[in-house]
Each structure stands twice: as C-alpha cells, then as structure tokens.
Image: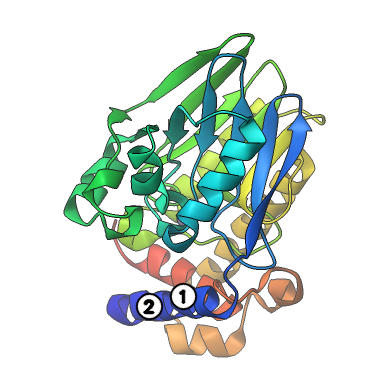
Amino acid sequence: MKKILTALLLIAVSTSYAQDVATSFKSTEIVPGIYMVEGVSGFGGGNMSLLVGEDYIVMIDDGILPLAPTLLAHVTATAGRPINFIINTHVHGDHVGGNAHFAENGTVVFAHDNIRKRLVADSSSAGGDGGLPVVTFGEGVTFHLNELEAQVFHIPRAHTDGDAAIYFPAVNVIHAADVLFNNLFPYIDLDNGGTVDGFIAGQKKLISMADDETKIIPGHGPLATKADLQRNLLVLTDSQARVKLLVDQGWTIDKILEANPLSVYHEDYNWSFITTELMTRTLYRSLTTED
Ligand SMILES: [Zn+2]
C-alpha cells in the first residue's frame, strides 16, 4: 500500500506539472519589505516569500526546477538586487527546485539538517548537488535584517521531518509553508518523516503565535489569517476523529472508503493532489502503523 500511495502521489504531481506549469511569477507586497511570490497561470511551486531588506535580500523557498531561471529573473527584478540567502522550508521539489540555479548565481541556501540529509541521498529535485544547502540548522536560526528579524524555527515531524516556519515579529507575519494548505486537505508526507499528530501540533504552535491581525503565508492556497488556520486545523482534527472511530471498530480501509467519513469536507477541501480518498488513506495509515 505504501508503494502504491507513493506511486499515486508521483503521478498526481507529475500530471499537475504537465498540465499547467506557471508561465511567470507575481509578487505581492503584504507588509512593507515582505512579498508573497506565486506562479501565474499555473503551478510554479509552493508559495514563496521575498524579504527586501536594506542590506540583504532573503527568499523563502524557490519553486520548481523547470522554472528556476524564470523565478530568478523575476525576484531579482522585484528586489532590485541579487538574492543573498534562501531558506528551504522542507525537502519537496516544489520548494527546493531552484536551489542549484540560485546557488550558481551566488545565493547561500539555508535548511534544516534533515533536508540536507535527504538531498545528499538524492539531489535531483534541487537541481543536483549544487543545490545542497550550505548552512544547516536543528532547532532554528535567526536572520537580523536591520529592523526586520526573521526567526526560522523547526516544526518536528509535521509535513515532513525537516519542516521550518518563519516568524517576523516586527511586522506580524508568519510564513507557515506546508504546515498549512489553506482551504485544501493537507499533504502529510508519512514517507518523509511527516506525522498527522506532529502536523496538528505544528498548526497549534503557529496559532499560539498569531493574533487576529497576523498575515500567514501558507505553502499552498491563498494568504491566510489566524481564523483560517484554526478552521483548517479543525477540519484535520475532526477528519482524524472520524476515521479513528471506524478504525477502532476494526473496519478495513476498503470499508472505510466506502462509508466515506470525510464526505462532509469533500466539496470544500478535496483537490487534485490530495483527494478526499487520499486524505482518508493517509489518516488510516497513520492510525494503524507505528512511526
Ligand atoms: Zn511540501
């Protein structure tokens, strides 16, 4: 089942890439000096952030490999200067695809220890060994960019085992990365060290840091508020409880899929990559296997 699920995910990813790769990127200044960067007319990777400080330019994540030159041109023009640092939020190819291309152009890549470990084993999604992070951290690292402080902190065993989120206290912004899929069933990558309980704990931590004015940049989906994050957490915890109820009664995955306990969320949260069925399978697997 694990192999089948992985194969299904790979097909879903490659199909969505093949169907509509972004043609360009757009940057929206959400607070002075911080831009949210997204693909235009298609998928360019997870949402990114660009921090334009007086002294340094920092990017959070760098999209998919085929669009690396397009992204580099876009963000360099937006910032008006070359990019000094990139922070990878996790190992997936839609967040580290530009690593090697940016590194060739002088950018230093920062990432959690586990991202580098996984990329050392296979660096193809980051554009080859040139895309390996040069500086790694465990618990976190803080960038001091004039008045703007960027606190990068590790979220254990959530979307993957190398997740980082970034908090900017001075401007009340959180870059949640893939610990938030806003208004979408989340992808929890059990094969790369992610866990449902860790994902829930991570979202609770982000909620504890936010107030009603906080702007939250999700890895996928539109810019979010604390209320959005709370709603997405509720969907996940309730979905987990719905599947657990049936697992506790000894139901098989086939019987659970037939009963479709997540049908109440299908209309609003099902999407091409994480369908209602795949969300159900992920919750079932996490409840029935040791991690
Ligand atoms: Zn991801």
Q: Is residue 258 above or below residue 235?
A: below
Q: Which numbered tag is attached to residue 5?
A: 2
Q: Can I make out residue 49 in this image?
A: no
Q: Quadrant of the C terminus?
A: bottom left
Q: Residue furthest right?
A: 212
In front here: 154 or 91?
Answer: 91
**Does residue 196 sit above or below 284 in this rendering?**
above
> Which of labels 2 and 1 is toward the front?
2
Q: Amino acid at mark 1?
A: Arg
Query: Is 83 or 39 nearer to us in this picture?
Result: 83
Considering depth in this image, is 4 or 81 the residue closer to the camera? 81
As drawn, is 28 to the left or to the right of 248? Answer: right
Q: Is residue 125 above or below residue 218?
A: below
Amino acid type, callout 2: Leu
Q: Residue 184 at what x, y percent from top left? A: 66, 63
Q: Left of 259 or right of it: where is 227?
A: right
The residue indicated by pointer 1 is 281
- Residue at the image point whose x is 61% and y is 83% from the top: 260
Please state which of residues 229 and 134 is positioned toward the viewer in this rendering.
134
Q: Where does residue 57 sit, x and y in percent of width and height?
A: 54, 26
At a point 55% along the width and 46% down the height, the residue shown is 73
Query: Answer yes or no: do the residues labelled 2 and 1 have beta carbons within 8 Å?
Result: yes
Question: Is ligand 1 less than 8 Å from the beta carbon at label 1?
Answer: no
How far apart are labels 2 and 1 at the CA level?
9 Å
- Judged from the image, the secondary structure of the residue bearing numbered disc 2 is helix
